[in-house]
Amino acid sequence: MLWWPLVSFLMTGRTFPMTQTFGYYRVSTAEQNPQLQIDALKAAGCTEILGDVGYSGAKTSRPAFDEIMSRIGEGDKLIVWRLDRMGRSLRHLVEVNETLAQRGARFESLTEKLDTSTAMGEFVFHILAAVAQLERQIIRERTLAGLEVAARQGRFPGRPRKDNGWQMAA
């Protein structure tokens, strides 16, 4: 009599809750190709794939990401190709993860094989989020150090000036 609960459920007029598996991709510049991410998200079984092109991971507000976050709910899942596609700031990643948990949604990262529906997945998520932020800060420190060295050597950032033959009067 396993079929009776199903018949009873259908007779009440209620419908089965539909869950979504959202895939999210992001590339920082229009010159980058997101196809690798899209193919991986399709292979993971995403029912809807949205992405942002030309948006940095440092930005917390991105059109496609914001749309997913406004629609995701109980039983849904958000899948990204790699953790840094969702964001680079530890604070932002943790806030997104908490929002998903409050809504009863899950988060998965394909590259890191991360699923926050388990205690170990949640723990690893926090470690990887911290590493992503550290990586971003190290890149920033190196960039600033390089700019300082260039300034001390009398070089200025950017393209060298074009010599147009004019000389400034002293």
Image (cartoon, helix red, strand yellow):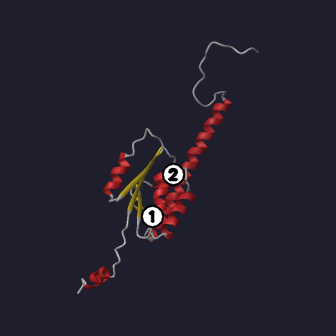
Q: Which of marks 2 and 1 precedes in the sequence?
A: 2
Return the x and y of residue 123 as percentages of the image width and height.
49, 66
Residue at horizontal 50 percent and vertical 46 percent from the top: 55
Rendered view: 5 above or below 15: below
Depicted 118 relative to depicted 63: above or below = below
According to the image, label 2 marks what residue?
62
Residue 43, given in percent of the width and then of the height, sits at 31, 56
Q: Where's the N terminus, which quadrant?
A: bottom left
| Element marked by disc 1 | loop
Where residue 53 sits, quadrant-wise, is top left
Give the residue at x 32% y 55%. Answer: 42
What secondary structure is found at the residue carrying circle 2? Answer: loop
Pick the front one: 52 or 146: 52
Q: Amino acid at mark 2?
A: Arg
For residue 135, above or below residue 125: above
Q: Residues within 10 Å of mark 1 (few under 14, many from 20)?
A: many
Name the kind of residue labelled 1 in the image: Ile
Query: Where residue 69 sits: x, y (%)?
Result: 48, 60
The residue beneath circle 1 is 72
Taking the image as shown, residue 44 lies to the left or right of residue 57, namely left
Q: Residue furthest right?
A: 170
Could you tell me which residue is drawn at 33 percent across and 82 percent down? Answer: 12
Query: Tags 1 and 2 in contact by the CB under 8 Å rule?
Result: no
